[in-house]
Amino acid sequence: MGVIGALSEATSASEDALRLLLSVLAGYPLAVVHRTFFYNKPAQQQHLFFVVVGICLWYFNCGSSVIHALASVIGAYLITNQLRGTDASIYAAHIFFLGYLLFGYWHHETDTYDITWTTPYCIMTLRYIGLVMDVYDGAQKAEHLKPDQKLTAIADKPGLLEIAAYGLFFQGTLVGPQFTLSKFRSFVNGDWLDSERKPPKSAFMPSIGRFLAGCTYMVLHQWGQFWIPDPWFNSDSFNSLSFFWRWSWVTLWFRLTMYKYCAMWLITEGASILSGLGHNGKDQDGNDRWDGVRDLHIIKWETGHDYNSVVESFNCGTNTFAKNHIHRRLRWLNNKLASHVITLTYLAIWHGYHLGYFLLFGIELGCVQAQNQLYALIKRTPGWTEAISQPVARPFIWLFGKITISYSMGFAFLMFGLIKTKYWIGPVKSLYFIGFIIYFIVWPILHIVLLRVLPRHPKKAEDVKSTTTEDKKEL
């Protein structure tokens, strides 16, 4: 039995999961190596270091399947250099990278979450699709670009070595974070260095803080796995509970399960901060900011009480990609709802074929739509805004919101976390399809009734103009 096998037996974790965790933890010594020996070297030398290390990490986790990553590097080079600035490049990127990923899902599909080469490749898929879009933007005239596109547009074609380094960079090639090529170039060029062109020591404490937070989440997740194992939701002991307690246990399981993602993102971010990739300029007091590749805003994630707080605090890199490279590029539809549906469908496809993925994002759409409609009702109804703004009302508003989003997300996550329909259909039935009933039957009817019976503020001309302007900005 090898070292990995012995650790697997001692910790009751799979060998694949241990390899992934060790690779993520390796980001810290690798960051020290880079900030000690390579930070001030020419870009090509840094790129070569990133490529060699990235290939080693892929091989350690995936063996000979590292060939899939190398094939994508070549594909990204050909698309960005031979089809630069053309609509064909966008189509080619999705056919090649997303198609390659979906083929991998189909070939390796099982009843559980398995860590295969598709695990890091799903990160590479979005990274290289985003790269192709940014290169496309760089070939357009500046006046034709939106402000968000100007920030990430790549005017000069990246070479093969740079593309390989960008995709295989050890701080983001396995579990994220997502970042643009312009961000990566800024890091390689040393924009994060201090006035003496040295790695700033201010990175140490934020890096340690994220590492310790990640370890805390990892312990909580492991405890949750033993306390509430997935098969329990199809057991007689679960089904014998009352409806309230079934839903409550599902909600608690959801939070503890999500902590594994929180843990990996925080540990990776800590290493990214130490390496310098996490640098995000200076704050208003002149201090270094280290939130440049943040995937989890802990306080907002734990205390947020509406769906906006969830989107803004969790999986931020992927959400930013979806917002900038999918949702905002659908402005031509002139329809926020259609753009939202297409974006969520895109993310569901990126996750894989399972029905539960699409149902999860469908419920997310229903939740967000219901929230937006509720906020609009509050805004238009006389006295409602003033009432909930009272200090005495705030704790109750927070509690209502927190319970609502926690229980709603817990129900929806059953169809994502248990993967196969045969595993989640029983628990979902035991909850009487409550999420679908609330957001797709009860709330739409109630919303129509409230629109008709509630009084409303007189609408002024300037309010109409302001609302129209805000809608355009959102699109």
Image (cartoon, rainbow, N blue to C red):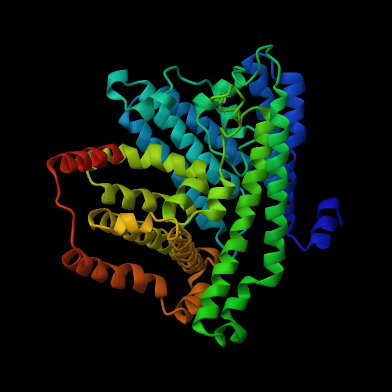
Tell whether 64 sits left or right of 341: right
Quarter location, residue 141? top left
Q: How many marks?
A: 0
Q: Residue 354: x, y in percent? A: 46, 62
Relative to 393, does residue 287 appear above or below in the rendering?
Answer: above
**Of the pair 359 and 45, the residue shown nearer to us:** 359
Residue 55 seen in the current view: no
Relative to 194, does residue 358 appear above or below in the rendering?
Answer: below
Q: Residue at x 47, y 59 (%)?
A: 398
For the N terminus, which image quadrant?
bottom right
Quarter location, residue 444? bottom left
Q: Residue 44: x, y in percent? A: 63, 17
Q: Residue at x 50, y 30 (%)?
A: 180
For the C terminus, which image quadrant?
top left
Relative to 459, does residue 455 appear above or below in the rendering?
Answer: below
**Of the pair 307 and 394, the residue shown nearer to us:** 394
Q: Residue 396: x, y in percent? A: 46, 64
**Of the pair 256 and 297, the residue shown nearer to us:** 297
Q: Residue 132: x, y in percent? A: 43, 31
Quarter location, residue 464? top left
Residue 439 seen in the current view: yes
Q: Residue furthest top?
A: 196
Tell whether 96 sits left or right of 368: right
Tell whether 400 sits left or right of 212: left
Tell whether 78 sits left or right of 143: right
**Of the pair 164 and 185, the residue shown nearer to us:** 185
Relative to 419, does residue 59 appear above or below in the rendering?
Answer: above
